[in-house]
Amino acid sequence: MAGKGDLLYAWTMDDELREKAETGGAVTALLRHALESGMVDAVFAVRKGADVYDALPALITDPAEIGGIAGSLHCGTLLLPKQMRRCLLATEPNMRIATVLKGCDVKAIYEMAKRNQVNLDNIIIIGLNCGGTIRPETARIIVREKLGLDPDSVVKEEIDKGKFIVVTKDGEHASVSIDELEEGAEDLLGDPGLGRRSNCRRCKIKIPRQADLACGNWGVIGEKAGNATFVEVCSEKGANLLNAAVKTGAVATEPANPKGIDIRGKVENAMLKLGDKWRARYFGALGEGTERLNKIREQTSRCIKCYSCIENCPICYCVECSTRKDYLVEPGVIPPPFMFHLIRFAHISDSCVNCGQCEELCPVEISNSVFMHAIQTDLEELFGFHPGEDMTPPVLALVEESAERKRLEATGSDQIFDIFR
Ligand code: FAD
């Protein structure tokens, strides 16, 4: 019987499923078992969209359809918990769900749970190790310009051992080193070059241990290499799902090879150091104090106030958004007064999970996630609050908001609001 803390190799006993899966197919087999056995009402994951670069949210209630979601999409940059809340939990808040989340998704779901947007008691989280994702349009440029291939001819993509690898419909394999793509970045706040998304470069959650199970391919060696999924059991809930799936014969397991465990640890550490290196480069490019403020003001002067950064943020759930209040942000002005951005920084930066959606979906390509992540990192150092790691309330929860609002209304003006008029 598996228990919390165990490190295992796992694989599906269904040959058809293993063909479609990324490594051992354990993730899809576990999802199917959770659905078939009635542990959950639905599975929420991602599946391939129009092409290999495209990912779509997938809601599955029929176990027979589960094969359609097997496999990893490294250009799939959806923030899944936000989609889950939007598509499903807004109308069915008590639905029991099994979901598959990479590190930033897992951090986001914890912050959403703190804000009563999801109920973690109803959700089984299968976490995926993640070394990073590439934007679909960037992936197409890499394939065309660096690999000399037609992006539409690609039928499979993967990121493995530091390389972006593609296979075409004619069976041609081509690859390029991620380091090589990213080292070409000259102006991190303007044109970050090719490679992974900027938030993925700075990410330091490679194995999401706050999930119920953390699954990946790092550390699978020997005869099981490529044919098994490395599973770290992170909670009792995760252990129960795994044990139940093994009992019915849906999944088989064996203890992970000690040498594989060691390799996995070393790769994780190397990736964390790489994250530190990128943080230093990005935050260094942003500067400090007035220099940083001026750079943020300059870039945000392109803002068209479309609200995409707010609507796609997993932290923004105020009932009355202050950016829409006339007395704080003058309406009908493009670009909006800097106060619009200051409100965002003040309200959410303590909890930013570096998911990158505010930057990914910004139509005028403002480096929003760099700004927010830099502030969050400073706040983490100051207050010791680590967003998305557990259910600890954020720094702002310590402020009695209604009392603060009363104080502001009573004084009529506050120094913070007057500075940038
Ligand atoms: P499968 O049975 O094939 O199931 C895969 C599941 O992943 C499906 O449920 C599918 O919906 C879901 N999925 C696919 N793409 C995404 C996505 N973009 N976001 C969220 N869910 C998705 N493992 C490592 O050890 N090291 C890594 O560096 C690493 N990087 C990864 C990067 C990305 C973007 C992804 C998606 C996965 C990464 N993995 C990494 C995990 C690895 O690729 C496999 O997903 C894992 O080993 C599980 O294999 P499996 O055969 O059991 O999964």
Image (tube, helix red, strand yellow):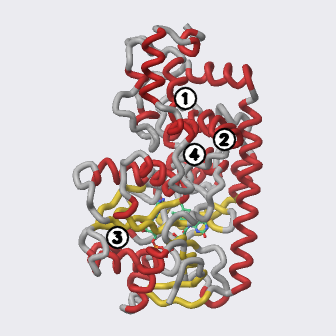
The residue that disc 3 covers is 68
Q: Which mark is residue 410?
A: none
Image quarter for residue 46?
bottom left
The residue that disc 1 covers is 346
Q: Secondary structure at mark 3?
A: helix
Q: Which numbered disc, 2 or 3, marks the residue that appears first in the sequence?
A: 3
The residue that disc 2 covers is 383
Label 4 is placed on what type of residue? Asn
Distance (Cα) linking label 1 and label 3: 42 Å
Q: Which numbered disc, 2 or 4, marks the residue that appears first in the sequence?
A: 4
Q: Residues within 10 Å of mark 3 (few under 14, many from 20)?
A: some
Q: Residue at x 41, y 29 (%)?
A: 307
Q: Which numbered disc, 4 or 3, marks the residue that appears first in the sequence?
A: 3
Image quarter for residue 310?
top left
Q: Under 8 Å from ligand 1: the CB of mark 1?
A: no
Q: Secondary structure at mark 2?
A: helix
x%, y% of residue 408?
Answer: 47, 16
Distance (Cα) linking label 2 and label 4: 18 Å
Q: Residue at x 48, y 24 (%)?
A: 404
Residue 3 shown left or right of residue 250 in the figure? right
Distance (Cα) linking label 4 and label 3: 29 Å
Q: Which mark is residue 354?
A: 4
x%, y% of residue 341?
Answer: 53, 24
Q: Residue at x 57, y 36 (%)?
A: 349
Mark 1 in CB contact with mark 4 (< 8 angstroms): no
